[in-house]
C-alpha cells in the first residue's frame, strides 16, 4: 500500500445548502469536503453509503447532498441525535411552533431543574427553566422531523461564548465544542465575575432555525442507528452498500462522553460528568483496539457489494505513542478488505481548530491519513 502526499482541492460544497450540517459544533469532526469529494468523483447514481462511526453525521449529510442513501451508526447519544437531524426536513416555522408548544404545554411537575453552584452560574434561572421544559418535552416525544431538528438546534445553542450582540447561546461563557468540567467552570466564572445572561430561548431557536433551514437539500434517504458498530445486527443484514466512508475514534481518545456531558444531560443523561465508556472501543492496549476495529470492518464487509470501497480517515493523539497508519493497517488484516493506498491528510489543527476558552494550547496534532481499500 503506497502513501501519497496530500494536495489541496477546491471546495465542492455549496454554502447555502450545508447550514444544517453545522447545526451543532462537535469536538471531533472531519470537514464536509472530505466525504463529499469522494462521492462527487466516484459514486454512481443509486448507490448507498455506510458510516459505522458516523459522529455528527457528516458522511450522511454528504450522501444527502449527492442524492444517495446512507446508513449511520454511532454509540454516542449526542452523535446519533445530531446525525439523525441531518437527514430530516422541516421549515423554521415548524421548528419554532414545536418549541413554543412544548414551552406552553409542559407543566413544572413534569420536569426537574438540576441544582448546585454550577447550574446557578452556568444559566440564568429563567433560561434554565425553559431549557428543562424543552428537555422534558423532547424526551417524551421526539419523533417528528421538526422536533428532531429542534433538539439538534438546542444542543448547538446549549453552551458557547458570550457575545456583545444578541445572544446566540444559552449559557455563561463556555467553549462551543465541549462542556467544561463543573468545578473548573465555577472557578473560572468566579475569578472573572461572569454572571449568566437572561436569554430568550425561543428567540435564539428562531434565529438559529431560520439560518439552518433557509434552504435544504432534497429529502434524505436513509437512517441513523444508535448502537455499538461491533454488533453485526445494526448493519441491516443485506449486501446493499457501495461505499464505507468513516473516521473511527483515534487510539486513546476516550473522552467523547465526558467532553459532551452537558449536551448528553439534555438528551437524558445525568446532571454530572459521566466518565464511563460503555459501548466504546477498548483503548487499554493497541491489540484490543485493533481487534475492535477489525470486527467493525468485518461487519461492514458483510453488507457491502463486491467491489465496494472503504475510505477511512484516521490519526492519533499525543499521549499514545502509536503510529496511526500502522494501527489502521493492522485492523484491516484478516478482513475481506484489501488496502490500496493511503494519503496524508494534514492534521486536525489545520484551519479547523477553534480557540479554547477553558484550556491551554494543546500540543501540535498528529498527522492524519486517508486510507483506501476495496472489497474483493
Image (cartoon, helix red, strand yellow):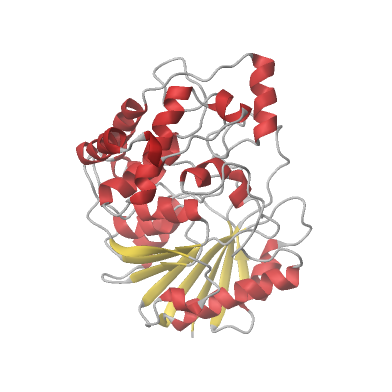
Q: Residue at x 58, y 83 (%)?
A: 335
Nearer to us in this view, 62 or 367: 62
User: 198 left or right of 322?
Assistant: left
Give percent across and percent down for residue 187: 70, 24
* Mark count: 0
Q: Residue furthest front?
A: 109
Q: Residue at x 65, y 36 (%)?
A: 181
Q: Is residue 171 above or below residue 269?
A: above
User: 348 left or right of 318?
Assistant: left
User: 233 left or right of 43?
Assistant: right
Q: Is residue 325 above or below residue 14?
A: below
Q: Quadrant of residue 364?
A: top right
Give percent across and percent down for residue 141: 32, 51
Give percent across and percent down for residue 143: 30, 55
Whether residue 87 is visible to the viewer of this picture, yes or no, is yes
Whether residue 57 is visible to the viewer of this picture, yes or no, is no
On the rendered image, what quadrant is the N terminus found in?
Answer: bottom right
Nearer to us in this view, 260 or 318: 260
Q: Quadrant of residue 316?
A: bottom right
Q: Residue at x 56, y 29 (%)?
A: 119
Q: Is residue 182 above or below residue 345?
A: above
Give percent across and percent down for residue 243: 41, 71
Amino acid at each position: 500500500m503506497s502513501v501519497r502526499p496530500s494536495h489541496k482541492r477546491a471546495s465542492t460544497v455549496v454554502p447555502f445548502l450545508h447550514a444544517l450540517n453545522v447545526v451543532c459544533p462537535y469536538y471531533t469532526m472531519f470537514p464536509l469536503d472530505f466525504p463529499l469529494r469522494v462521492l462527487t468523483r466516484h459514486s454512481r447514481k443509486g448507490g448507498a453509503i455506510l458510516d459505522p462511526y458516523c459522529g455528527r453525521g457528516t458522511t450522511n449529510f454528504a450522501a444527502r447532498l449527492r442524492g444517495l442513501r446512507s446508513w449511520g451508526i454511532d454509540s454516542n447519544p449526542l452523535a446519533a441525535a445530531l446525525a439523525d437531524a441531518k437527514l430530516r426536513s422541516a421549515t423554521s416555522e415548524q421548528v419554532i411552533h414545536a418549541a413554543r408548544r412544548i414551552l406552553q404545554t409542559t407543566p413544572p411537575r413534569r420536569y426537574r431543574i438540576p441544582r448546585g453552584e454550577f447550574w446557578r452560574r452556568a444559566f440564568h434561572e429563567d433560561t434554565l427553566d425553559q431549557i428543562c421544559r424543552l428537555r422534558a418535552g423532547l424526551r417524551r416525544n421526539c419523533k417528528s422531523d421538526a422536533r428532531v431538528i429542534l433538539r439538534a438546534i438546542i444542543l448547538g445553542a446549549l453552551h458557547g461564548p458570550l457575545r456583545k450582540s444578541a445572544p446566540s447561546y444559552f449559557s455563561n461563557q463556555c467553549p462551543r465544542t465541549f462542556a467544561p468540567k463543573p468545578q473548573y467552570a465555577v472557578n473560572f466564572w468566579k475569578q472573572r465575575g461572569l454572571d449568566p445572561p437572561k436569554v430568550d430561548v425561543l428567540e435564539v431557536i428562531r434565529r438559529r432555525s431560520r439560518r439552518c433551514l433557509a434552504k435544504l437539500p432534497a429529502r434524505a434517504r436513509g437512517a441513523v442507528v444508535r448502537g455499538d458498530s461491533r454488533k453485526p445486527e445494526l448493519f441491516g443484514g443485506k449486501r446493499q452498500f457501495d461505499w464505507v466512508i468513516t473516521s473511527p475514534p483515534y487510539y486513546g481518545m476516550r473522552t467523547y462522553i465526558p467532553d459532551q456531558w452537558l449536551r448528553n444531560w439534555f438528551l437524558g443523561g445525568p446532571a454530572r460528568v459521566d466518565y464511563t465508556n460503555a459501548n466504546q472501543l477498548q483503548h487499554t492496549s493497541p491489540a484490543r483496539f485493533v481487534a475492535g476495529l477489525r470486527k467493525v470492518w468485518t461487519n461492514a464487509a458483510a453488507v457491502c457489494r463486491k467491489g465496494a470501497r472503504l475510505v477511512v480517515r484516521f490519526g492519533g493523539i499525543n499521549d499514545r505513542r502509536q503510529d496511526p497508519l500502522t494501527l489502521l493497517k493492522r485492523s484491516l488484516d484478516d478482513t475481506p478488505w484489501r488496502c490500496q493506498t493511503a494519503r496524508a491528510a494534514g492534521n486536525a489543527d489545520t484551519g479547523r481548530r477553534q480557540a479554547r476558552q477553558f484550556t491551554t494550547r494543546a500540543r501540535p496534532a498528529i498527522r492524519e491519513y486517508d486510507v483506501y481499500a476495496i472489497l474483493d
